[in-house]
Image (cartoon, rainbow, N blue to C red):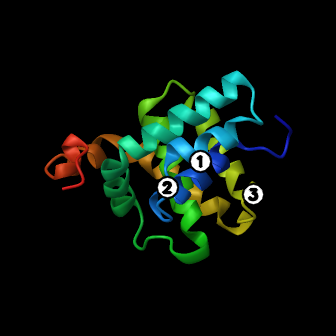
Amino acid sequence: MNKSTNLRSLCAQLIERVVDKGESLNTALPAAQKKLSDKDSALVQEICFGVLRTLPQLEALIGKLMERPLTGKQRVLHYLIMVGLYQLEYTRVPAHAALAETVAGAEVLKRTSLKGLLNGVLRQYQRQREDLLASIQDGPQRYLHPG
């Protein structure tokens, strides 16, 4: 992996292709993994499948953390936030690493001006985690079902 490769931005782009463009992750993922080490390939696979598996819950959390969703050309950052939330909640990636790498992903995606937004949303999640998770437990996302 070269220095310009950011695994979190790669995951966000793959998830965008699946959710917004209707591609299959089983089709999109292998081509992306060819350029990665085994360790990085496994992390990308875990994050992508994990985000898609927990998508209803992550969408609900973002709805609580942000006033307006990111749309248009900024939509990939919506998925980058999901990648960060998934890592904080479901992986053993240390929180500081998950935050730093996710925010650095905005730079790779040429959205440097939104790094502060990503950092703020993810840190707000860390501070309010218990309350946020409790607030979404009444809906269908409790069972990770789209409803």
Residue that lies at the very extreme toward the left in this rendered image = 138
Residue type indicated by callout 2? Val
Using the image, determine if residue 57 lies above or below residue 118: above
Q: Quadrant of residue 133?
A: top left
Q: Nearer the viewer, mark 1 or mark 3?
A: 1
Q: Please rate how many residues cluster around mark 2, counting C-alpha atoms within 10 Å: few if below 14, some from 14 to 19, many from 20.
A: some
Marked residue nearer the N-terminal end (1 or 3): 1
Q: Measuring 65% from the left and 30% from the top, which residue is drawn there?
A: 41
Q: Dot 1 lies on which element? A: helix
Residue 86 on image: x %, y %: 46, 40
Q: Is residue 143 visible?
A: yes
Q: Quadrant of residue 59?
A: bottom left
Q: Dot 2 lies on which element? A: helix
Q: Are marks 2 and 1 in contact (CB under 8 Å)?
A: yes
Q: Measuring 50% from the left and 71% from the top, which residue is drawn there?
A: 70
Q: CA distance from mark 2 to mark 1?
A: 8 Å
Q: Measuring 46% from the left and 45% from the top, which residue is drawn there?
A: 85
Q: Please rate how many residues cluster around mark 1, counting C-alpha atoms within 10 Å: few if below 14, some from 14 to 19, many from 20.
A: some
Q: CA distance from mark 1 to mark 3?
A: 22 Å
**Mark 2 lies on residue:** 18
Residue 28 disc label: 1
Residue type indicated by callout 3? Glu
